[in-house]
Amino acid sequence: MPRILAFLVVLLALGLAQRAEVSVGSPFGVQGGLRFPLVPLLLDGRVYGGVGLEALGGGVDLLLKVPLTDLYLGLGGFYGTGPTLALPQEARGQGGLRGVLGTWLNLPLPLVGVYVEVHPTLFLAPDQAFGVGAALGVSLGL
């Protein structure tokens, strides 16, 4: 029964998703995820999973679009099996909260978007610390 339920959740997520995304960088190395419109033209939700050299994990973000710009701001949480990619190295952790400061790069590609994000991060596990990460990603419209 749990496998059937997981399959239905993934199938429903693909049906509701607005964009599929792949990014390289913080928090885990290589992430893949889906972006959902929660409030049209204002608020998106994102779920992602990732794998890296030291960690495997996932997270959720709420992203607020800044009107009339390509900028967006967000807040999210994540958890993984090992330390994430962030600076400084001694302040890394495997779970916590992160802010998202992002912008879309204006490229003339249909249904393809490229974005850059900076992630100020508050690590809560295993120790409390502060770090900063970044990511570069590609988003495909569905």
Image: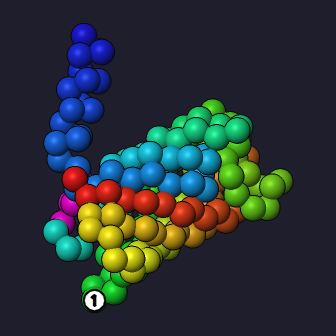
The colour scheme applied to this rendered structure is rainbow
Answer few, some or many: residues within 10 Å of disc 1's Cα (few below 14, many 20 plus, some between 14 and 19).
few
Decide if residue 75 is on the left or right side of residue 45.
Answer: right
Q: In this view, does 48 lie above or below 115?
A: above
User: Residue placed at 28% from the left, 89% from the top?
Assistant: 68
Q: Nearer the viewer, residue 62 or 139?
A: 139
- The answer to whether any part of residue 42 appears in the image is yes
Question: Given the current orientation, which residue lies at the most extreme right position?
Answer: 90
Image point 39% across, 77% down: which residue?
A: 107
Secondary structure predominantly adopted by residues drawn in magenta? strand
Name the residue nearer the viewer: 89 or 125: 89
Residue stretch rendered in magenta on the structure? 35-39
Q: Is 98 left, or right, of 111 in this rendering? A: right
Going by the numbered disc 1, the residue's amino acid type is: Leu
- SS category of the residue bearing label 1: loop
Tell me the residue that label 1 is attached to. 68
Residue 63, image x and y in percent?
A: 36, 66
Q: Position of residue 82 (x, y in %)?
A: 68, 37
Query: Left or right of 3: which side holds 49?
Result: right
Queried whether the magenta region covers residue 133, the answer comes back as no
| Quarter that holds the N terminus | top left
